[in-house]
Image (tube, rainbow, N blue to C red):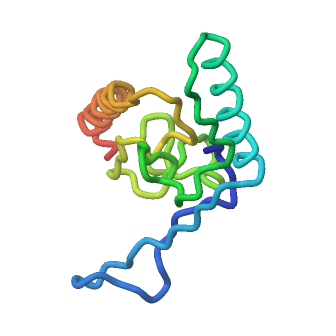
Amino acid sequence: MLPRFENQVALHPTKTDKWGIPQLDINCQWSDNEKLMMEDAAQVGADMLRKAGVLDVKSRTTYDHNAPGLAIHEVGTARMGRDPKDSILNGFNQTHDIDNLFVSDGAAFCSSAVVNPSLTFMAMTVRAVKYCVNEMNNKRI
């Protein structure tokens, strides 16, 4: 899935859980471009298998009709950036608006590769913790 402005997660304006915390309102759809890319990937994969000598190739050339998010690492809900107008976190995973709040998971990513990002999450967390400790020691948070 490509990072697109139209795909968003927000707090639901009226629905809450049993503790009164707003539920997530998730708006996420496959774009026409993503559907075409999935069809192309299926066709190219089938062609590669046939050229490699595989005889019984069942070419599936339609996109995944399931909703996005079935086999992924959730990323991108608290984007990292320099400008608070278009991002939630600074370069140390600290929120722009709340000095003592750090988000150290995949939320800072605007997109993800096809491999497991867990080690990157951990490295970013180490960096955030070092920064946080330094800020605390210097009485800035």
Q: Quadrant of residue 81?
A: top right
Look at 44% across and 26% down and name the residue there. Answer: 115
- Quarter placement of the N terminus: top right
Residue at the top extreme of this rendering: 52
Residue 66 position in % (x across, y down): 53, 58
List the single residue furthest toward the front.
Answer: 55
Q: Residue at x 68, y 42 (%)?
A: 61
User: Picture coordinates of residue 120 (x, y %)?
Assistant: 39, 26
Could you tell whether 60 is left or right of 100 in the image? Answer: right
| Front-lying residue, 2 or 135 | 2
Q: Tell which of 64 and 74 is nearer to you.
A: 64
* Extreme-bottom residue of the structure: 14
Residue 5 horizontal side relative to residue 70, left or right: right
Image spot of residue 112 (x, y percent) = 52, 35
Taking the image as shown, residue 33 lies to the left or right of residue 82, namely right
30 relative position to 121: left or right: right
* Relative depth, front residue between 38 and 97: 38
Question: Residue 24: x, y in percent?
Answer: 43, 71
Q: Residue at x 29, y 81 (%)?
A: 17
- Identify the residue shown where x is 50% and y is 29%: 114
- What is the total number of numbered labels drawn onto the structure image? 0
Dividing the picture into quadrants, the one containing residue 31 is bottom right
Q: Is residue 67 above or below residue 102?
A: below
